[in-house]
Each structure stands twice: as structure tokens, then as C-alpha cells.
Image: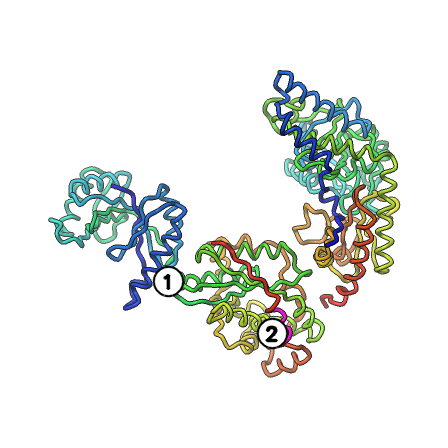
Amino acid sequence: MQDVLLVRYGEVFLKGANRPHFLKVLTDNIKRAVKPLGGHVWLSDSRVYVSGFEDMQACIDRVSKVFGVYSVSPAVEMEKDFEVIAQQSVKMMQGYSGTFKVQGKRSDKKFPMNSMEIAAEIGHRVLEANPNLTVDVHKPRHRLMVEIRDNAYICVEEIMAVGGMPMGTGGKAALLLSGGIDSPVAGYQLMKRGVRLCAIHFQSPPYTGELARDKVLQLAKKLAWYSGGMRVYMVPFTKCQLEIHEKCPDELGTLITRRFMMRIAQRIARDFGALALITGESLGQVASQTMEALVCTDAVVDMPVFRPLIGLDKTEIMDIANRIDTYETSILPYEDCCTVFTPRHPITKPKLDTMPKVESGLDVEALVNEAVEGTEMVIVEG
Amino acid sequence: MKQAYLDNSATTRPCEAAVEAMSRCMREGYYNPSSVYKSAVEVFRELRNARERLLAPVRGEGCELIFTSGGTEANNLAILGAVGRMRDRQVLAVSAVEHPSVRAAFDALADQGHDVRVIGVDGEGQLKWDELERVLADGASLVSCMQVNNETGALLDARRLHSVVNGRALIHVDGVQGYLRVPFDMRYADLYSLSGHKLHGPKGIGALIVKKSVRLLPRQLGGGQENGLRSGTENTPGIAGLAAAVAEMCALGADMPAELMAKKLRLIEAVRSAVPDVLVNGPAPEVAAPHIVNLGFPGVRGEVMLHALEGEGVYVSTGSACSSKKLKVSSVLTAMGVSPRTAEWAIRFSLSPHTTVEEIDYAADRIGALYDQLKRFQRR
């Protein structure tokens, strides 16, 4: 008899011919997540099992954050002996009160009792032993699951996990990571769909300092947990910003700056092998995030730009940031490059056809090249 | 790359003598000074010698000296400890330009119901004496003022403070930025705080000097060390390092403050010739502490200048290091009547007796070059 963690996967189940591949990736990711706990992970009968760890709670915490996992249950694994199973069931239901139901499941058809019989007999034993319980087969408060597979498994609790798709099955994309609240959340949303990310950060010394850089690396580290490491590209952006500040109309400064970021990001993304860019923009949040402004920023790249937060309110974004534990880091007050030369009255409805003229005083190609060439790559451990 | 470390009010580099003394204390004299065998008694004796060494420069013979974890704890113990021994609701006076470790202690007392009055300062950072007089007339029982302002170098006239108070209240002086760089005499205060790492000693050690007549409520209870005022086994390596640093500072001689002042004036002159528009925030440099000056570079935010200088190996700070991560303009400068816009341009330079003329000239040269670049790019 041993404690195991029973892991259910969600959407992966729906895959057809690709399912073995998705399952292999998922199992590998779970292995990586529990490695520090010394757990053993295996796939069997459309479930993933983890055993051989000491700290159940730590194991639950880690596995339930692996993308692709639908839910987890702390379970007990034992031999397929009905008496043993019944005794263990009674023991596990001791502390509970209210309504319950036993759910039997038999995939090993050689076991002498069928699912209904297992449920009825175990239910009877549990009821006899615990007077605080009554049976409700429709809406039970507790569900005791008894499964007869290559071994027998019993569990009561089911803890919902993060869901999504296994990391690495969704392709690669590049996240524009500022240090604010939104961009880490945007990255997380795509990672949850199995996308492997690199992050691109724009720094503008001396207008931004070492603390701002440190903050971004801390945020990247939070995200890197989900993918077991992440590349962060640090782009020297001062020269672009100063040129824009000097040669472009003040009220368009932020928008032109965004256009430069997108151009540079696309170049780096291609080197990384990414097929898309990700930003944390939310429609209408600031002047550079109006629909007109987004048209102007999208126009300089031909990669798709994913904006998973486009329809979310700030409070909704903050909720997710809190959940993924990036909020506290994001609100540290270090200046980032976006706020260095914020114009007092930015234009909210810029026109795409005026952009070439507005940027005509800039040597766009040379500035982008210089920034890309000066970019430093930092590997953040997961 | 050439370097100029001009952030000595944030912290100083521990001197060799301090490092050596600490290392020796950890390797050889590691005994607990409360133990009773000979080697331990040696350590106990060294503690006593260290106390005497620290008290002598401020004419503190006859005062008690309590070792603390640093300036913050010394300030906390002085203020909360003194008021803790008083009954009922007290009227308390604190200057408007104190360090957060003093301000926060008074804030805590205000939360407990005490009547905390903030004494303003003028544009030179000098106490508004008439305000103080009114608070004393209302029965203030404790007055706290810093000897040297950490952001502007403004000096306290301790003698005048003492005569204005005239025995009506306890006087606490935060001497963290002043001790050994500006003369002080314990005749003028009842409580005086100091910190080791501001004078080439180690971090994690400081002291509160207390007149014998003053009773304090301890804030840390236990084995009764430090006369029951600060329990816990003494930080003997820290104390050894601090005592060595103090000895070395004292050995620099009586001319040291004047030499330090000359270096500071040289820095200001050199900066002024490179940047004629430069502003001095706070008192005229000649009448301020010899090692601190606060300069403003019009049109360039202090933070930007700081990071630009950092790129050249010149280390300075905006405001005090303890609060400069908070990204707002200095409340000290605001209290002195500096406008928020001007306060945004502020950079604090702080020297040590070990600062070299080469460092000063290099820093001034870099400031001149950077200012010309940076002032072109201002937020419109």
C-alpha cells in the first residue's frame, strides 16, 4: 500500500492521432515538476500517477500547476483484494460527515465484482462505520472513488488544477515583457496553451536602472517555472527612444516607440524560432492601446500578434497576476522604458497613413539593426 | 574602469583595520563575553575598552554606551525606550527632516496616543527655534534632532538646542551621519545614536550613548546584556570592527574635518565649472557638514543622472539610500522649501576622509560631460 497522486488530464484527451505525443510531453513535464521531490511518474490507463514522494502537499502544489493537468487526487494504491480495499475505504472516510457516494470503476474485468457491486458493498461498510454520513447518489458532498485497474486505487478529494495544454505542444512565441502588471499575465495565458516563450525586454539606461532589470528577471523567473527555464532578451533601447524624442512629434512618441519595439521584437523572435509575438495590451487601457493605435503597431510586423488580455479589465488582469504571483513584483516602482518620455497629451486615434511621414526623420533600419545587434540574452532558470 | 565612490553616507568600505579586527575576533577571540574563564574575560575586557574608545571622542566619559545592531535600532531604543519609561500622554518634538528610523518611531508613538509635534526647518535646514520653544512651553518631554542631515549635510546647532531646551526635555541626537566627522559633545544631549558602517566599520553594529540619569525601557528582553537594555549575546566581531574603525578615524587627527571640507569644496567648484547652472540644495556648503552636499542639475532627473554616472563608475545617490527605492521626491528637501520639480533634480554626494582628489576630479569631469548630453532630452 502506498500514497500516490492521481493526475487527470483534460483537453489532451480530445486529441486524436496526436494524443500519444501530447501525453508523452505532459508526462515529461510532470516528471520535471516533481523531480525535486524525488517522485516517480508513470502513465497508465489514461491517468498519470506519481508515487515515491514524501510531501503530498508539495507534490499537489507542483503537479496542479503543470499545464495540461485537469485535476489531481491524493490516493492510496493497494492490491486488488476486496477486504483490503474495504478497510482502507472505511479508514479514509472516517473524518467526513454529510452526504457521500461511492463511485466504483473496474477496468480490470477479471476482478470478481462489477462496479455497481463494489460501490454498494463499500458504501455499506462505510455507512456502518461512520454514523455521520448518509448516502446521496445524485448530489453527494463527498465522492469516494474506488478504481480497480492494474492495482486498486481509492481517493476522496479532487483538486482542480490549472488546465490548458502541455508546455511545448503549442509552438514558440516571443513575449514583450515590460515589468508592468499586464505582460507577465499575457505570457502566462499563452504558456497555458502550451506555448514555449522567450521574453524580450527593452531597457533604456540611464533612464532605467539595474533594479528595473532585476525586476524583469524576477518576473521572467516566475514564468520560467512553467517551462523549466526561459530566455530573456535584453534590448538596448535608449538610442531609439532619444531619436524618437528628438525627431518625432511628442504626442506620437509612445506610438512610434511601440512600433520600434515591435520591429525589434519580430527580428529577435525569428532568431528564436518563434511564430508569433505576445503583448499585454488591453483595448483602450492607455492611448497606445486604442484600436487605431494597435492598427499602427501591427502594421510594422507580419507575424501574428497575440494579445490575450485584449478583452480584460485591469482588475481581471490583476486577479490573474495575483494568482500567478507576479503582482507584487510588477508593482515595484522602478521606472521602465515605457514611462521615460511619456507625452503629456498622446494622440488616441492615430492614422496609419501618416506614420511613414512621422518616421521619415528616423533611420528606422539602422536603429533597429543596432538594437538587435546590441541585444543581450540572459537564461533564466525555471 | 576608473571609479569614484561618492556615496559614503549610504555606506563606507570597511577599513583594513576593521576587517582584521573582526577576523581576529572570529578566529581567536570568539568566546562569549558572559562566560567566566580567562579567555572569555579577555573578550569582556575588550568590550569595555571598545566602549571607552567610542565614548571618548564625544566627551562621553560617565555616559553609558549600549551596542545595537546599527543606527536604526539605536534611534528606536532612544525614542521608544525613553518614552516607554514616561507615564501618561506625552508631548514630543521631532524635526521635519529626520531619518525614517526616527520618524517611524515617532509615528508609532503618535499611534499610541502621544502628542507628536513636528518642528519645521528653514531653507538652510536649521530648526525653527520659535516653533521648538512653543512645543517646549506646552510641556514637551523629548526632543529629537539629527546632528548632520543625511541628504543635505545641514548641521544641528547642538549647543543652542541644549540651551533652548534648558533641561525641560530629554534631547536625542541622531549622530549617524555626524559622529567623528563633526565634533560633538555629550554635554548637549541625553541620547546619541551612531552607526558603524558609516565610518568604515562593519554593518550590523551601532551604539546608543545614554546619559546615566536617563532611564530607558528595553526593547529586547533576555539575558540582561548591555545593562539589561539590550539582551542577546554581544556582536563581538562587529564591536571589534567598529572599535578599530573608530580608532583609525581618530588617528586621522584634528585636521581631518577641515581636509574633508576642502575636498567637498573642490568637488563643488569642479562641478560648477563644468555645469555653471548647478544648484546647491540646502545650506551653503561652507557651513554644512564637511562630507555631504546635495546638488541639483536643472532639467535632468536625479535618477537619470545617477544611472548615467553609474555607467562611468561614479556612485552617488538621490536622497538617502534607505528611501531612494521609493521613487518619490525627498521629503527632506520638500520640508526645506525646495519645490518638487527642483527636488527631482537632486543628487547627494557624500565623501569620506579616504575619498581622493582623483575621484573628485574624475566625478566632476564625468558630470560635466553627461550633463551636456542629458539635458538635451527632457520630458516635454
- The chain letter for the residue carrying disc 2 is A
| Secondary structure character of the magenta stretch overall | helix
- Name which residue type carries label 1: Met
Q: Residue at x 86, y 32 (%)?
A: B163
Which residue in the protein does label 1 denote?
Answer: A165
Task: Specify whether B240 is left or right of A139.
Answer: right
Where is residue A100? Give x, y as percent.
24, 47
Closer-to-camera residue (B215/B325): B325
Residue tagged 2: A348
Residue count near mark 1 (Cα–Cα under 10 Å), binned few <14, some 14–19, many ≥20: many
Magenta segment: A365-372
Query: x, y percentage for residue B153?
Result: 80, 44
The earlier-in-sequence mark between 2 and 1 is 1
Question: What quarter of the picture does the N terminus of chain B occupy?
Answer: bottom right
* Residue B197 seen in the figure: yes
**Image coordinates for residue B51, horizontal then vertical, percent:** 74, 25
**What residue is at 67 percent from the left and 54 percent from the top?**
B327
